[in-house]
Amino acid sequence: ICLIMAGGSGSRFKDPLKYMREICGESILRRLIRQLKLVCVNIIIVASDKSLYKISDLCREDFNIDCVETSGHDYVSDLIIMLSSIRARPILISGADVFIRSIDVLIDFIDKAFSLKDADIINLAVYENDQEKLIGLSIFFGDKGVWRNISYDSDEVFDIDTYEDLRRAENVCR
């Protein structure tokens, strides 16, 4: 199961629908769905009333995608609600604003995560300015909270939080 968290306010980007912006000729969200379909049996988009109207077409286009409306209060609250209502594990969770350069990176992350035996939560991180930055892509194997990061170069995966992030990701297409 894959959850795509799409209910945020997009406050840093000043647009709650930032994942509808196009990179490489398609929206960030549509690209993410296309990539996740290669590794997920079920995809659920978690949206708020602020965003559900804009993505409802994606849910109708494909019978393997469900849309669930949550409060949209904040990411953590919505995630807790979803994790408590879906007992199946492992579950891959991604922000709707995650841009993955290549499906190979996603597959590599999943392979590495499944090879680790000492953590309940595996996060994808990138190195930026000599620091690890979490991207918003995780696999939950359990709920105890023991976590580890798997890091990649910052030009492989992007968390589109600002216009600068969007410009950096757009450079991938050139």
Image (cartoon, rainbow, N blue to C red):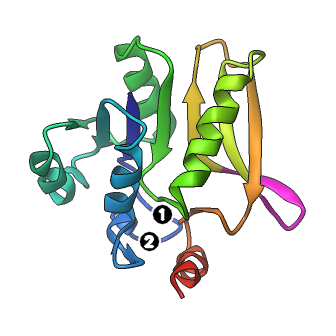
Q: Quadrant of residue 51?
A: bottom left
Q: Quadrant of residue 128?
A: bottom right
* Residue 163 to residue 111: above or below: below
Instruction: Pinpoint residue 95: horizontal percent, then vertical percent.
Output: 47, 48
Q: Is residue 122 visible?
A: no
- At 86% from the left and 68% from the top, the residue drawn is 129
For disc 2, the marked residue is: 14
Quarter that holds the C terminus: bottom right
Question: For numbered disc 2, what is the local secondary structure?
Answer: loop
Quarter that holds the N terminus: top left
Instruction: Pinpoint residue 80: horizontal percent, then vertical percent.
Output: 46, 24
Alpha carbon distance from label 2 to label 1: 5 Å
- At 41% from the left and 13% from the top, the residue drawn is 88
Is 119 left or right of 38, judged from the image as shown? right
Q: Which of the two residues, 38 or 1, is positioned nearer the viewer here? A: 38
Instruction: Pinpoint residue 133: horizontal percent, then vertical percent.
Output: 74, 53
Q: Which of the two residues, 51 or 99, is positioned nearer the viewer here? A: 99
Q: Say which mark, if any, is on residue 131.
A: none
Label 1 neighbour load within 10 Å: few <14, some 14-19, many 20+: few
Magenta-highlighted residues: 127-134
Q: Is residue 93 magenta?
A: no
The reply to whether discs 2 and 1 touch (Cβ–Cβ < 8 Å) is yes
Question: For numbered disc 1, what is the local secondary structure?
Answer: loop
Q: Quadrant of residue 22?
A: bottom left
Q: Amino acid at mark 1?
A: Ser
- At 36% from the left and 74% from the top, the residue drawn is 21
Label 2 neighbour load within 10 Å: few <14, some 14-19, many 20+: few
Q: Amino acid at mark 2?
A: Lys
**Prevailing secondary structure class for the magenta stretch in the rendered image:** strand
* Residue 40 to residue 174: above or below: above
Is 29 left or right of 151, judged from the image as shown? left
For disc 1, the marked residue is: 11
